[in-house]
Amino acid sequence: MKILLLVAACLLPAQDDPAALARLIRPQPGESKWAAIPWLTNLKEARERAAREDKPLFLWRAGGGDTLGRA
């Protein structure tokens, strides 16, 4: 969050109130629709559910060997 605030502070006009800057850069309702999806973190459970519901499986993997971006 500190890096994001620093970048925003460089790009936006100077703000006297840091809380006002935080409100400007905070994600707004409806902006992150992917976060509303009930993601599964257990691969075995996800495979079983996909097979049971006859739906495709979407696997999201980050670099570094760890899943979910915790690299």
Image: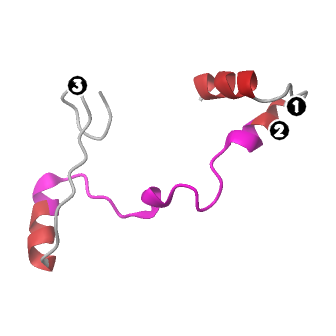
Position of the C terminus by quadrant: top left
Residue depicted at 10% across the width and 77% down the height: 52
Secondary structure, mark 1, is loop
Q: CA distance from mark 3 to mark 1?
A: 38 Å
Q: Which residue is mark 2?
A: 20
Which numbered dot is residue 17?
A: 1
> In the image, what residue type sits under mark 1?
Asp
Image quadrant assignment for residue 22:
top right
The spot of residue 60 in percent (x, y) is 25, 47
Q: Which residue is mark 3?
A: 64
Q: Earlier in the sequence, mark 3 or mark 2?
A: 2
Q: Which residues are magenta?
A: 22-46
Q: CA distance from mark 3 to mark 2?
A: 36 Å
Residue depicted at 25% across the width and 52% down the height: 41
Which numbered dot is residue 51?
A: none
In the figure, is residue 43 to the left or right of 70?
A: left
Image quadrant assignment for residue 61:
top left
Circle 1 packing at 10 Å, graded few (<14), some (14-19), many (20+), is few
In the figure, is residue 8 to the left or right of 52?
A: right
Residue depicted at 22% across the width and 32% down the height: 66
Q: Are marks 1 and 2 in contact (CB under 8 Å)?
A: yes
